[in-house]
Image (tube, rainbow, N blue to C red):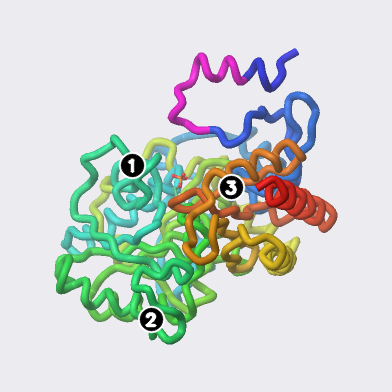
Amino acid sequence: MKNNKSLLAERNQNIPQGPFNVHPIFAEKARGAIITDVEGKEYIDFAGGIGTVNVGHCDEEVLKAVQDQMGRYIHTCFHVVMYEPYVELAKKLNEITPGAFPKKTMFVNSGAEAAENAVKIARHATNRTATIAFEDAFHGRTLLALSLTSKMKPYKFGFGPYAPEIYRMPYAYCYRCAFGLEYPSCEMRCAYFLRDFFDTHISAEQVAALIVEPVLGEGGFVVPPRGYFEILHKICREKGIVFIADEVQTGFGRTAKMFAMEHYGVEPDIVVMAKSMAGGLPLGAVTGRAELMDHPQIGGLGGTFAGNPVACTAALAVLNLFKKRDLLSRAEKIGKKVSEKFAEFKESYPVVGDVRGLGAMVGMELVLDRKTKEPATALTKKLISLCCEKGLLLISAGTYSNIIRTLMPLVITDDQLNDGLTILGEALKELNDTK
Ligand SMILES: Cc1ncc(COP(=O)(O)O)c(C=O)c1O
């Protein structure tokens, strides 16, 4: 019988090291918030396939919808023969994404593709070339998306030259403020910096789009203060710049609202989505103002598998589940519990430098010294590995990979959540005691 060790040896022999693996285990089965490996060991899943299974692994209703759809047809290619689930899902996303204006939606296969298409559409509609992105941002690994992404190693290193006309400004990362200021006395210097940016980096009239995550995902679960996005959005409006919200990681209920921008009362011109949309099947979406979305010529947008009918059907089932199980309230409760526990960890362990979050998107930044804030990168890795041994799956985030982030399925039970947090607490204690 195959075990983790023998499969790992085969993996290493046949697959390059580039596609990374956090945990040395192979899945046999996954349900709700539990993954069972090929050796029969169960793990509580706080990673959720990097935020792709907010409705849980293999939900019965998603499974049924997918099976029914597969029995009818799996793929025709939307560009050859159209199908209803694509249209139905587009209609729904046009309704539920923030913004009280006419919208249209197109589908792709991933978050990177969604981000790329949003930029393409903004360029076409404005007849401008530049895009403003942020430090610590992550928008994907394909060339334009990679160029929008900030972190050098491992994402960008060795893969240049990058796509041109991308300009980067600091994000509202209050724990590590790029301006050395403190909120609220900073008076949002980082947001108003966009005005200076037009003088020092790129003229506003050359900027097609500003793309920003409402909460940094891979960049470390950084939550900007209220007011930040309102300022950026207002300046974009004044200058005719398309405001793109990358809701790939925040979207689909993670922050206890369907889209995190709703917390800020900002209506983006374009929203990009992927990850948890289709309950684990690959699907991305770009929803935006109808006049922007309609700008590119016929045939200018699309893709062979883009908006696959099985994935669209799964996404429709996911949307039903959010309503039926009231998963937004559940996200709020999970977030509260995790934040309280992380705050306790911060009281007990000096290595916990900062705790922050929005809804169930909660992060804990680990540092070697609270004064210097030197990132505790190696220790974070050790912590994740120790938790895995104890039956809890975690992943890190941040430019220095020193942030523990929580992306558990929102259907996790109270007992599973408590057990997971207990394991994390034990592992933190163990590392603290052996330091
Ligand atoms: C905010 C954000 N945008 C884009 C992406 C890229 O998505 P994908 O990996 O599906 O290409 C990610 C992935 O982590 C993300 O978090």
Name the amino acid, label 2: Met
In this view of the protein, can residue 11 be seen by the observer?
yes
Q: Front-most of 54 and 355?
A: 355
Could you say whether the residue bearing mark 1 is in a helix, strand or loop?
Answer: helix
Q: Which residue is mark 2?
A: 188
The residue range painted magenta reads 8-20
Q: Which residue is mark 3?
A: 380
- Label 2, residues with CA under 10 Å away: few <14, some 14-19, many ≥20: some
Residue 307 in percent (x, y) is at 47, 45
Q: Earlier in the sequence, mark 1 or mark 2?
A: 1
Q: Which residue is mark 1?
A: 156
Q: Earlier in the sequence, mark 3 or mark 1?
A: 1
Left or right, residue 147 beside residue 264: left
- Tell whether position 12 is magenta: yes
| Residue occupying the point 72% across, 68% down | 340
Could you say whether the residue bearing mark 3 is in a helix, strand or loop?
Answer: helix
- Label 1, residues with CA under 10 Å away: few <14, some 14-19, many ≥20: some
Residue 125 in percent (x, y) is at 23, 63
Check residue 345 in the rendering and tell me which mark sits there, or answer none. Answer: none
- Label 3, residues with CA under 10 Å away: few <14, some 14-19, many ≥20: many
Q: Front-most of 287 and 52?
A: 52
Could you say whether the residue bearing mark 2 is in a helix, strand or loop?
Answer: loop
Name the amino acid, label 3: Thr
